[in-house]
Image: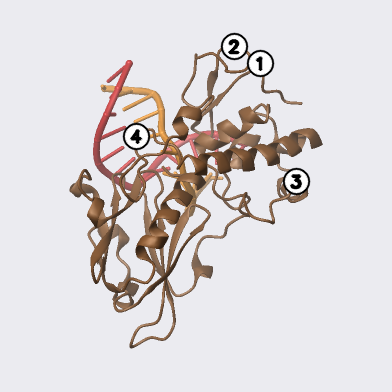
Chain colours: A brown, B red, C orange
Amino acid sequence: MPELPEVETIVRQLGPVLTGRRTRELKIYDRKLETGLKEAVPGRTVETVSRLGKQICLALGPNGSDRNPLWLVFHLRMTGRLIVDSDRSGQNERHLRAELVLEDGSLLFYDLRRFGLLLVLRSLEEAAPLGIDPLGPRCTVSRLAELIGGSTTAIKPWLLRQDRIVGLGNIYASEILFASAIDPRTPACRLDSDQLTRLHRQTRRILRLAIENCGTTFSDFQDSHGRTGSFQNLLKVYDRQGEPCPRCRGAIERIVQQQRSTYFCPACQKTS
DNA sequence: ACCCTCCTGTCA
DNA sequence: TGACAGGAGGGT
């Protein structure tokens, strides 16, 4: 469900709420999430809450029997939610999959479809290999061009590859390509330098704007207080097939690429 | 580069 | 009933 702006929203909220609090226990309610390392969780302090791509990372400090730090990594996938217990009213308790019990309260992991992940790691290096963060200093136009290299994959599915650039998902990929006036079917390696420049600039602009608006809510996204974002009001093409393009008034189209919907304006978005 | 799969739910 | 859902790993 959540893409980079939604995950960033959650991390910014959880940071002040969780930092400095002490862990009591990690309870697992879905056997898919079972991990032997959960026994290492109690008696630690939450030191930081951070985002790694679309993953939410809690750094836990040492405890009495282990002076090494420990990482809790959540990936919400399609329908995961991280909710602080004081905001749990309104959640469907049937979908509660795990609970980080703190000395005073808890952090609840709900996940309707059960695609989400909860990892307990000794080192963040064990997390999935990731590409560059689009909002980070390493994301330059030339780096983007390097990452694309000779890939003939259509640019829209290319943007979803987390081993190249992290954080983009189905909504923002369509929105970014509309803002960049690039046809989503264009082979990535055929983008010219103007298009690459626009793609780079619009990626960062749209993600920042979405973060300012606390992300996008359709049906599933809620932040850690169980609230919704507002960027859905600013979406130009996503889920708008048949509606007029905000730029040219032509009809927005929906196509399928790699089994996923893509929305675009065939008049405004060009191959080159 | 494609197809399927993992799950559960909603909507036409 | 079938299509679809903001993700991603695996197989061919």
| Residue A22 seen from this side | yes
Query: What label does residue A141 carry, if any?
Result: 3
Q: Quadrant of residue A86?
A: bottom left
Q: Are marks 2 and 4 on the same chain?
A: yes
Which quarter of the rendering shows the C terminus of chain A? top right
Query: What label does residue A136 carry, if any?
Result: none
Q: Quadrant of residue A25?
A: bottom left
What residue appears at the point 19 percent right and 48 percent down from the top-left corner?
A94
Q: How far apart are labels 4 and 1 at the CA level?
A: 30 Å
- Local SS, label 1: loop
- Local SS, label 3: helix
Q: Are marks 3 and 1 on the same chain?
A: yes
Give the residue type that dot 4 points to. Ser
Q: Nearer the viewer, residue A71 or B12?
A: A71
Q: Could you tell me if the residues under marks 2 and 3 are in contact, i.e. CB atoms within 8 Å? A: no
Q: How far apart are labels 2 and 3 at the CA level?
A: 31 Å
Disc nearer the start of the sequence (2/4): 4
Say above or below: A256 vs A245. Answer: below
Q: Are marks 2 and 3 on the same chain?
A: yes
- Quick one: label 2, few (<14), some, or many (20+) residues within 10 Å? some
Give the residue type that dot 3 points to. Val
Taking A267 as reference, is A6 left or right? Answer: left
Residue that label 1 marks? A267
Residue that label 4 marks? A219
Taking A5 as reference, is A189 left or right? Answer: right
Q: Nearer the viewer, residue A121 or A62?
A: A62
Say above or below: A268 vs A74. Answer: above
